[in-house]
Image (tube, helix red, strand yellow):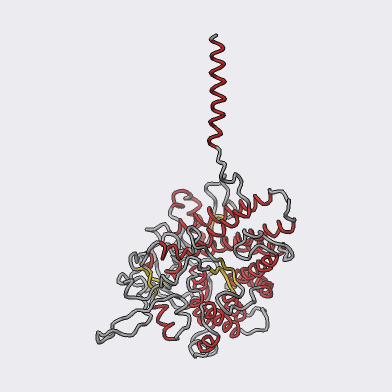
């Protein structure tokens, strides 16, 4: 009898546990995430990181002096330590973007080819590779030497840092291979999974244009390195015939990599989320941007969603409504005293532009001035095309663009300075709200002349030219961090990276 009771107890315990285990099953959510969904999520995470105004994640709009802060001026003064800006950026780019692109590719490779032809699967993998290359290029352009060959591997918790130039050249090889695979006769991710170009065969053709536009930019990034002159020439000249070519004639058309967001959270425009959705009133435009645009009567100011402010004149009387910028990094900036974003005009669905015809035309103008064979069009024509495209995108007209370009201060033949200054200054205006793009362009061309605010933090000498490494790397990956810091010339915001070797390299500090 005792043995029977023991047997019954064991039987009930086992069967009871089996029945209870079923209660832990999640019957609502998918047990396997499709590779296309992982691609979508990674791309969304990338755009959110590159275009957020959250000062814990991305300070590039402050670095290039489009905006200054009112409540927390430290970030406008280039403090990268008090807030985990650089660590947050590294975490998002590696964990949320690159790791998910890697997993998306793995899942797609492991998924049987059912209704999807092999050519479409190849296109899908090539598109993932293109976005991975874009992300990696941004990481290297931002920090310099970074974990690469040992990154994204959970068996290597302390990855070594690879040489930035070596990484960059490998990325270009990967990009070339991806371009060679793309077949415009077949779809890519498919409908519902490609929020950039739609996922059909026509979208694949657009991906080819984007990939070559990226290749052009990466070639330009190498063009100041004497040892890479031949490589830069090959990259630029092979990319140029296949870049974005359809001019932007209105906000809705023209060649661009753009994503339109949704009305509801969490899929709203990230700039809207941080500035309007969060109820923030602490970003004002700087006089560094506003004053020259006022002087040139720039038609983009209204399109930039700027508010007009009523100031006091010398006699103490109210002046007319106009655009007024605050001081970069100043502790005296007041939200109501200076021009800021008009929240009523900043919508959650507003699109984000990662790259477009405007940027490509500025790059082609630069390539022409550098002596590369990118077609019969002059640098001045590319420059004019870029400015006209930018004005049209921000709601201006052809007539306004022509009037703007006719001004001696803007016209390519009469504008102040060499081609670095002409192209760099106008590109800076055109890349408004595209912080990383503007920051990279400014670092490469050294124009416009930006000066660090007088109140900048003392350990940052001048406008930052790189993100410092995450402070956590010093303790969690100390030996590799030390080697990487020494290799680039010091883990400082003022350390110029391998590609930042132009002839200007002026001192942007007040010291």
**At which x and y percent is residue 76?**
38, 68
Q: Is residue 222 visible?
A: no
Q: Which corner quadrant of the image does residue 224 belong to?
A: bottom right
Q: Residue furthest left?
A: 316
Tell me: 386 left or right of 320.
right
Residue at 50 percent across and 64 percent down: it is 50
Compared with residue 122, is residue 290 higher up or lower down, i.e. above or below?
A: below
Q: Is residue 355 visible?
A: yes
Compared with residue 6, is residue 52 higher up or lower down, i.e. above or below?
A: below
Residue at 46 percent across and 83 percent down: it is 298
Tell me: 182 left or right of 499.
right
Q: Which corner quadrant of the image does residue 15 belong to?
A: top right
Compared with residue 284, is residue 83 higher up or lower down, i.e. above or below?
A: above
Quadrant holding the N terminus: top right
Tell me: 376 left or right of 301.
right
Front one among 42 and 90: 42
Compared with residue 455, is residue 322 higher up or lower down, i.e. above or below?
A: below
Residue at 56 percent across and 11 percent down: it is 3
């Amino acid at each position: 009898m005792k043995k029977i009771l023991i047997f019954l107890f064991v039987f009930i315990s086992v069967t009871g546990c089996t029945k209870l285990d079923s209660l832990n099953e999640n019957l609502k959510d998918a047990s396997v995430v499709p590779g296309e969904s992982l691609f979508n999520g990674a791309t969304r995470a990338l755009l959110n990181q590159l275009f957020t105004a959250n000062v814990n994640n991305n300070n590039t709009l402050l670095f290039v002096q489009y905006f200054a802060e009112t409540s927390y001026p430290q970030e406008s003064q280039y403090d990268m330590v008090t807030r985990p800006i650089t660590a947050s950026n590294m975490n998002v780019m590696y964990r949320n973007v690159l790791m998910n692109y890697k997993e998306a590719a793995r899942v797609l490779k492991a998924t049987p080819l059912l209704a999807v032809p092999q050519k479409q699967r190849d296109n899908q993998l090539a598109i993932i590779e293109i976005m991975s290359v874009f992300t990696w290029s941004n990481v290297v352009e931002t920090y310099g030497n970074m974990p690469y060959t040992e990154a994204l591997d959970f068996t290597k918790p302390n990855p070594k840092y690879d040489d930035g130039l070596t990484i960059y050249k490998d990325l270009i090889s990967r990009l070339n291979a991806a371009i060679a695979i793309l077949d415009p006769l077949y779809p890519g991710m498919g409908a519902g999974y490609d929020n950039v170009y739609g996922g059909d065969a026509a979208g694949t053709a657009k991906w080819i244009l984007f990939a070559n536009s990226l290749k052009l930019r990466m070639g330009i990034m190498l063009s100041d390195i004497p040892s890479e002159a031949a490589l830069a020439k090959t990259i630029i000249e092979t990319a140029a015939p296949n870049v974005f070519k359809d001019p932007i004639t209105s906000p809705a058309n023209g060649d661009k990599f753009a994503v339109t967001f949704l009305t509801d959270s969490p899929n709203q425009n990230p700039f809207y989320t941080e500035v309007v959705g969060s109820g923030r009133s602490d970003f004002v435009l700087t006089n560094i941007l506003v004053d020259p645009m006022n002087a040139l009567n720039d038609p983009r100011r209204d399109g930039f969603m700027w508010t007009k402010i009523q100031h006091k004149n010398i006699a103490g009387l109210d002046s007319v409504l106009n655009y007024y910028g605050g001081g970069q990094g100043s502790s005296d900036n007041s939200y109501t005293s200076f021009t800021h974003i008009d929240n009523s005009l900043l919508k959650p669905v507003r699109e984000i532009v990662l790259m477009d015809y405007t940027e490509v035309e500025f790059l082609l103008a630069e390539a022409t001035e550098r002596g590369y064979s990118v077609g019969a069009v002059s640098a001045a024509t590319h420059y004019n095309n870029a400015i006209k495209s930018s004005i049209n995108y921000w709601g201006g007209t052809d007539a306004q663009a022509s009037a703007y370009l006719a001004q001696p201060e803007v016209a390519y033949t009469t504008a102040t300075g060499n081609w670095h200054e002409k192209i760099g200054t106008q590109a800076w205006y055109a890349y408004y709200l595209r912080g990383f793009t503007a920051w990279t362009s400014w670092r490469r061309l050294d124009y416009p002349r930006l000066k660090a605010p007088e109140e900048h933090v003392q350990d940052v000498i001048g406008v930052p030219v790189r993100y410092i490494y995450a402070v956590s790397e010093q303790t969690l990956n100390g030996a590799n961090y030390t080697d990487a810091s020494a290799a680039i010339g010091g883990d400082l915001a003022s350390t110029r990276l391998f590609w930042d070797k132009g002839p200007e390299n002026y001192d942007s500090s007040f010291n």
